Image (cartoon, rainbow, N blue to C red):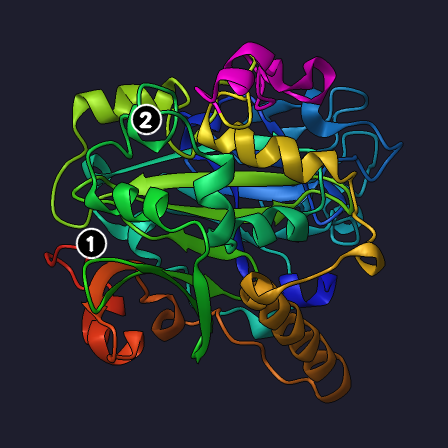
Amino acid sequence: MGKLFRRYWQPVLHTDELPEDGCPPVRVKILSERLIAVRTPEGEYGLMDEFCAHRGVSMFFGRVENGGIRCPYHGWKYNADGQAIEVPSELNNSEFCKNVKLRSYPLVKVGDLLWAYLGEPKMQPPLPTWEFATVPSGQTFTSKRLQESNWLQALEGGIDSSHVTWLHGGGPTGAGLEADPLFAGAKGNQYNKGDVKPSFEVVENEGGLLIGARRNAEEDHYYWRVTPWVLPNFTLVPPRGDHPVHGHFWVPIDDENCWAWSFDYHPTRDLKEAEVAAMKAGAGVHSKNIPGTYRPEANKDNDYLINRDKQKTGELFSGVEGIAIQDSSLQESMGPTVDRTKERLVATDAGIIKARQKLRRAVEALRDHGTEPMGNVPEHQNIRSVAIVLPADQPFVEGIGDGFEARAGVRQTTV
């Protein structure tokens, strides 16, 4: 699976983490590699092994200078590509440097994120073209939080629409979907509450799957919420009314932890000040983090600040505040890697079952035949989620048509 992930550009930093030319370096851990990200005084981004080739000192303590970063221990200097360019102790400095290079990876800015490609240079795919990262900056917002479980547990929660009515529920005056400013007022919330037994249809798509959750709507009509999953770790939450569209990247830190990158964007308008303020405060798919960190304030060490009184009264069905923390609390409660041999999967798990099968096939095809995986090219990233009411006899793919396509200046298909 690690080799599969290395065929994709992955978000690793928000641009705010390297805010200006010549700023201090930042530690990055991704796919179990400990790396350092730099932004030189000339504005060049670099991502390289965290540790100096000389004595293994962490370059987090390095001094960013013109042309690169210098180790504070003995003055070895590296450029943004990890190539040694100065070793003061060596008389034949230039010749010595030719043979000293830290492992490094491309680091590029697309939207408000810095993306890294950790695979073979000759297999590097085109830059990411996801709509949330390519709309004007005023139309998008991205946050990240630490999730203390493996990435697949987190992703499986993202493609499971059957839990929404339960986990994110609350009484009529409670803190359910209607109480969240990024969900409130949408007609779809009524359909969610009115039918707690959704039926699932999963359709193969170029980059992954379209996971359709069907609930009863008006007579002879169904309310469809269709979640796209694009290999290996991208999901889009079906929209609600004119609220911004949500989505996630689940990026492995190591086998037991991941970064949950959560974004909101609107295809046709700027985000409102109140919407951005709510996102920063932890509404919607975002979290309120411990200052100076990306760990949520509500975490496993404090039982996610569960409120048993609100749980008992039904104001909060789960007793946990916030959509994101409601999800992470249960996904982390399974342990860092759940024992899937003990699961009892049912019909509503169809999306999860098919996603596991597709991931396994992709890994085996890459391993055994060198088959390039899907999802890392623009045509597979030109995707939207959809919420729609359709006649009961109409297949959702047919009824939605080009509503799945990300088209500039065209509003999302939503209820």
Q: Position of residue 84 (x, y in %)?
A: 70, 43
**263 or 188: nearer the eye?**
188
Left or right of 55: which side holds 205?
left
Q: Is residue 46 above or below residue 301?
A: below
Residue 292, quarter of picture: top right
The numbered mark, 1 or 2, whose residue comes first in the sequence reads 2
Q: Which mark is residue 180?
A: 2
Q: CA distance from mark 1 to mark 2?
A: 18 Å
Q: Is residue 111 visible?
A: no
What residue is disc 1 on?
Answer: 414
Residue positioned 69% across, 42% down in the render: 253
Specify start and end residues of the magenta stretch as a single range: 291-316
Left or right of 228: which side holds 249?
right
Q: Position of residue 124 (x, y in %)?
A: 54, 69
Q: Position of residue 6 (x, y in %)?
A: 64, 62
Q: How many marks?
A: 2
Q: Which mark is residue 193?
A: none
Residue 182, quarter of picture: top left
**206 or 157: nearer the eye?**
157
Q: Is residue 412 above or below residue 11?
A: below
Q: Is residue 298 above or below residue 217?
A: above
Q: Is residue 277 visible?
A: yes
Q: Identify the secondary structure beneath mark 1.
A: loop
Residue positioned 67% across, 79% down in the render: 361
